[in-house]
């Protein structure tokens, strides 16, 4: 079950740039950029906490567990 980080979508909905979020949170721009990419493979939980507080969202708003399709389960 892939875990999807929806940060890029959330920023787009709020018309907020990655650089603006970086300034708001104190996180490095590279960290924000990585979380907005499709290749996120690891992240510190404290980073999620910082982002959720800065954006006033819950963790379940930021990450989604994508269920595998039924077709793949039967292969």
Image (cartoon, helix red, strand yellow):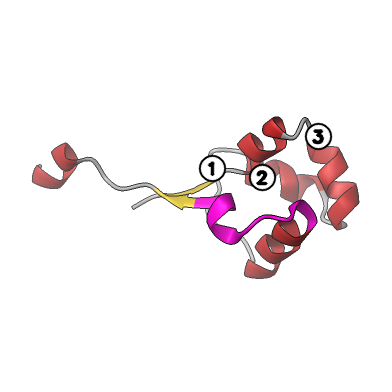
Magenta segment's dominant SS is helix
Q: Secondary structure beneath disc 1?
A: loop
* Stretch of the chain drawn in magenta: 54-63
Question: Is residue 34 or residue 47 the one in the foreground?
Answer: 47
* In the displayed structure image, the side of residue 58 where residue 24 appears, left or right: right
How far across and how far down the image is residue 71, in percent?
Answer: 15, 37
Q: First in sequence, mark 1 or 3: give its number.
A: 3
Residue plotted at (53% across, 57% down): 60
How far across and how far down the image is residue 41, in percent?
Answer: 52, 53
Q: First in sequence, mark 3 or 2: give its number.
A: 3
In the picture of the structure, the residue carrying the numbered disc 3 is 17
Label 1: how many Cα within 10 Å (few below 14, some 14–19, many 20+): few
Q: In the picture shown, does residue 58 fall above or below 66?
A: below
Question: CB under 8 Å between callouts 1 and 2?
Answer: yes
In the picture of the structure, the residue carrying the numbered disc 1 is 39
Q: Please check the rendered image and state whether residue 8 is part of the magenta-colored stretch, yes or no.
A: no
């Amino acid at each position: 079950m892939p875990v999807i980080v929806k940060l890029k979508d959330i920023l787009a909905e709020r018309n907020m740039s990655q650089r603006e979020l970086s300034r708001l949170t104190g996180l490095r721009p590279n960290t924000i950029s990585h979380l907005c990419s499709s290749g996120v493979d690891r992240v510190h939980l404290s980073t999620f906490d910082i982002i959720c507080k800065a954006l006033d969202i819950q963790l379940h708003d930021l990450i989604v567990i994508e269920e595998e399709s039924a077709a793949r389960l039967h292969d």
